[in-house]
Amino acid sequence: MGFSIGNAALRFVSGAFILNSGIGKLNLTPDQAAGLQSAAQRVIPQLEDLKSEQFGNYLSFSEIALGCTILAPFVPTRMAGMGLAVFSSGLLATYLKSPGMTEPDSLRPTPEGTAMAKDFWLAGIAVALLFNRKRRSRSS
């Protein structure tokens, strides 16, 4: 397992962002948790079966765990990339299925959707982590 400054930078930025997001959700009010749950139900309808406080806790702990996994240097880069890909796919699905987030017949965000559209960069980082291959140096 080699070290790549490029991969380390991608993992640090995305992992720290997700970890911070999860820590910020540790003390969600019931109304805040219900709002996040409502958005998530557009993608995963079965989330309706959870209490909003329970959903908020699961979301917070999941983001903390994922952020730590991405940041951990002993976790293989492709595994970190796969976790990030699954997470960012959920965020993008939520963005695309939420009314008023995109311009009509477009992926372009409305002013209200800009905050969610920024999650496309997480998907880009996931692709970079999954498909970045090290070049072997040629021996003379």
Image (tube, rainbow, N blue to C red):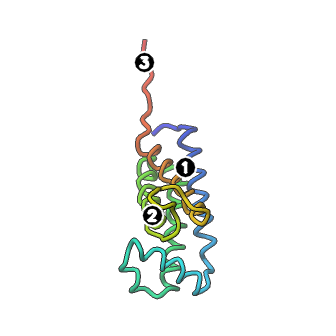
Q: Quadrant of the N terminus?
A: top left
Residue occupying image coordinates x 53% and y 79%:
56
| Badge 2 or badge 3: first in the primary sequence | 2
Which kind of residue does numbered mark 2 sit on?
Answer: Leu
- Disc 2 and disc 3: Cα gap in Å? 45 Å
Q: Quadrant of residue 44?
A: bottom left
- Residue furthest to the top in view is 140
Pinpoint residue 63: horizontal percent, then vertical percent. Answer: 52, 67
Q: Quadrant of the C terminus?
A: top left
Residue occupying image coordinates x 53% and y 83%:
34
- Tag 3, which secondary structure? loop
- Disc 1 and disc 2: Cα gap in Å? 25 Å
- Tag 1, which secondary structure? helix
* Foreground disc of the pair 2, 3: 2
Which kind of residue does numbered mark 1 sit on?
Answer: Arg
Neighbourhood count class around disc 3 (C-alpha, 10 Å): few under 14, some 14–19, many 20 upward: few
Pinpoint residue 70: horizontal percent, then vertical percent. Answer: 51, 55
Which kind of residue does numbered mark 3 sit on?
Answer: Arg
Task: Say which of 124 and 115 sits in front.
Answer: 115
| Badge 3 or badge 1: first in the primary sequence | 1
Pinpoint residue 3: horizontal percent, then vertical percent. Answer: 52, 38
Q: Which residue is mark 2?
A: 96
* Foreground disc of the pair 3, 1: 1
Which mark, by number, is residue 11? 1
| Badge 1 or badge 2: first in the primary sequence | 1
Which mark, by number, is residue 138? 3
Pinpoint residue 133: horizontal percent, then vertical percent. Answer: 42, 35
Image height of 44 relative to 71, above or below: below
Number of dots carrying numbers: 3
